Image (cartoon, grey):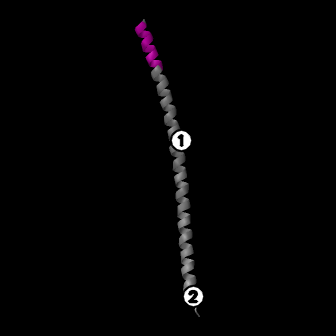
Amino acid sequence: MENAEQMETRFVDIEIKLAQQEDLVESLNQMVYQQGRRIDQLEAMLHKLGEHVRDGAQQANAGQVNERPPHY
């Protein structure tokens, strides 16, 4: 009888630990998903910033070619 009660207690403990691990895995998956979305947003912002810098550099170079030097 005592052995059956010990086995039952062990099974309950294992089930509790399994439920906690499933919850932890779900939380970690949600965090990874959110971080992936944030990384995508940051990459898009970086791409737009790079385009903005290139456009600004091209406009600055075009303006310098047509301007007279300051000593004229």
Foreground: disc 1 or disc 2 = 2
In the figure, residue 70 lies in which quadrant? bottom right
> Is there a contact, CB below 8 Å, between mark 1 and mark 2?
no
* Residue at 53 percent of width and 72 percent of height: 54
The answer to whether residue 33 is above or below residue 48 is above
- Is 9 colored magenta in this rendering? yes
Q: Residue furthest bottom?
A: 72
Q: Residues within 10 Å of mark 1 (few under 14, many from 20)?
A: few
**Position in image of residue 9 (x %, y %):** 46, 15
x then y, percent, for residue 1 = 42, 5
Q: Nearer the viewer, residue 34 or 57?
A: 57
- At a point 45% along the width and 14% down the height, the residue shown is 8
Magenta part of the protein: which range?
2-12
Q: Which residue is mark 2?
A: 66
Q: Secondary structure at mark 2?
A: helix
Is residue 67 located in the magenta-colored stretch of the structure? no
Q: Position of residue 47 (x, y in %)?
A: 53, 63
Amino acid bearing label 1: Gln
Say the numbered circle drawn on residue 64: none
Q: Where's the C terminus, which quadrant?
A: bottom right
Q: Which amino acid, by three-letter code, is at mark 2? A: Asn
Residue at 55% in and 51% down: 38
The residue carrying pointer 2 sits among few (fewer than 14), some (14 to 19) or many (20 or more) residues within 10 Å by Cα, namely few
Q: Residue furthest front?
A: 71
Q: Residue furthest top?
A: 1
Secondary structure, magenta segment, majority class? helix
- Indicate whether 7 appears above or below 51: above
Q: Nearer the viewer, residue 11 or 61?
A: 61
Q: Secondary structure at mark 1?
A: helix
Query: Looking at the picture, how far across and down is residue 69, in whole percent?
Result: 56, 89
User: Mark 1 highlights which residue?
Assistant: 30
